[in-house]
Image (spheres, rainbow, N blue to C red):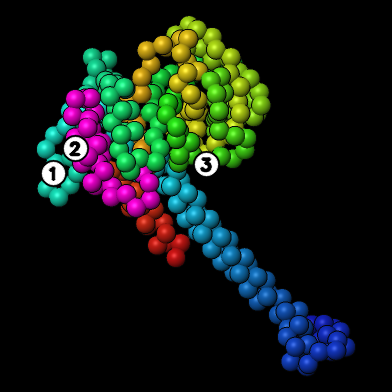
Amino acid sequence: SPGRGQWAGRLSARLPLARPVTLGLAHPFARPVRTATIVVAIAFGAAAATFAVGLGASLNRVQATESHGDVVVQPGRQQAPPPGGAPGGAPGVAPTGKPTPPDSAAVVAAITAQAGTSGYSGVARTEVTVAGHGEALEVAAFTGDNSAYGYEMISGSWFAQPGEIVVARPFLTATRTRVGDTVVITDNNVQITVRIVGEVFNIEDRGMQILTAAATLAAAEPDLRAVTYNITLKPGTDRDAYVTALNAALSGAGATARPVDNDASELIIIINTLAG
């Protein structure tokens, strides 16, 4: 009708296309309100689908980074295994309320003696302060040969020697630093200059956790020992049999091995279902 996009119809009719196509091109100008409503609906639908798929993918990657191996060794006395399960253990607790580190030498010897061991890392946790940042920050200090397992690098590289640290984006933002800069950390009143060599995806301690070699803190904490050990297994290794054999070897070390639960959490399942 007059005023209903006839000009668009006349212009589209000049195109070298089939008449149904040119009428379709002119129709949005004949019904502008309806066209705008459809465009908005498509935009909201695309945004919702993009958000759902992106959120599901992100949370699945977060879930993957929370697992740092196939088997974990923790301090504690060994107990009888539950029905149908692997041996468990009760954590040993020092008077300070922190877990008592197991016998490091005995644990490492037991882990490396197992035929199915692919790699391992011991993890000790402590706190330091960083120049220019008032709060105490958690440090995960690693030993062993597989400390990078489970962490996804964003930029730079994993630490290769004492004096190098790896941090997440919140740390870089809070301290106004970037990969390649040096910072001074204070541990037990001992100042240690370290260099940031990599940015990693890590949500521990609100993304403020520092990852480094245990030798970095040797001058301040010479007696720092790993509390937990993360172990990766060779392909084809029976995990339950490995845990049973390792627990037998750890009987006098004050530590217990158990399989790592890699199953998705209920929240991840709900989000994936909703995204689907």
Residue 159 image position (x, y, % from top left): 55, 29
Circle 2 residue: 88
As helix, strand or loop, the secondary structure at mark 3 comes to strand
Q: Is residue 211 left or right of residue 98?
A: right
Query: What separation in Å lies between label 3 and label 2 (alpha carbons)?
Result: 30 Å
Is residue 244 one of those drawn in magenta? yes
Image quarter hosting the N terminus: bottom right
Tell me which residue sits at (61%, 69%) in the image: 42
Q: Is residue 270 left or right of residue 52?
A: left
User: Bounds of the magenta span?
Assistant: 233-258
Quadrant position of residue 117: top left
Amino acid carrying label 1: it is: Pro
Tell me which residue sits at (49%, 27%) in the image: 211
Sequence-wise, the earlier of marks 1 and 2 is 1
Query: Are circles 3 and 2 on residues that touch, CB within 8 Å?
Result: no
Quadrant position of residue 181: top right
Q: Is residue 95 left or right of residue 216?
A: left
Query: What separation in Å lies between label 1 and label 3 (alpha carbons)?
Result: 35 Å
Q: Is residue 43 above or below residue 266?
A: below
Circle 1 residue: 82
Residue 179 image position (x, y, % from top left): 64, 29
Tell me which residue sits at (48%, 24%) in the image: 213
Is residue 73 one of those drawn in magenta? no
Of all residues shown, which one is farthest toward the bottom?
Answer: 19
Category of crowding for the residue at label 2, using alpha-carbon neighbours closer than 10 angstroms: few (below 14), some (14–19), many (at least 20): some
Q: Is residue 86 above or below residue 120?
A: below
Task: Please give the label number shown on residue 152.
Answer: 3
Query: What separation in Å lies between label 1 and label 2 (alpha carbons)?
Result: 8 Å
Q: Is residue 22 above or below residue 58?
A: below
Residue 202 image position (x, y, % from top left): 49, 36
Sequence-wise, the earlier of marks 1 and 3 is 1
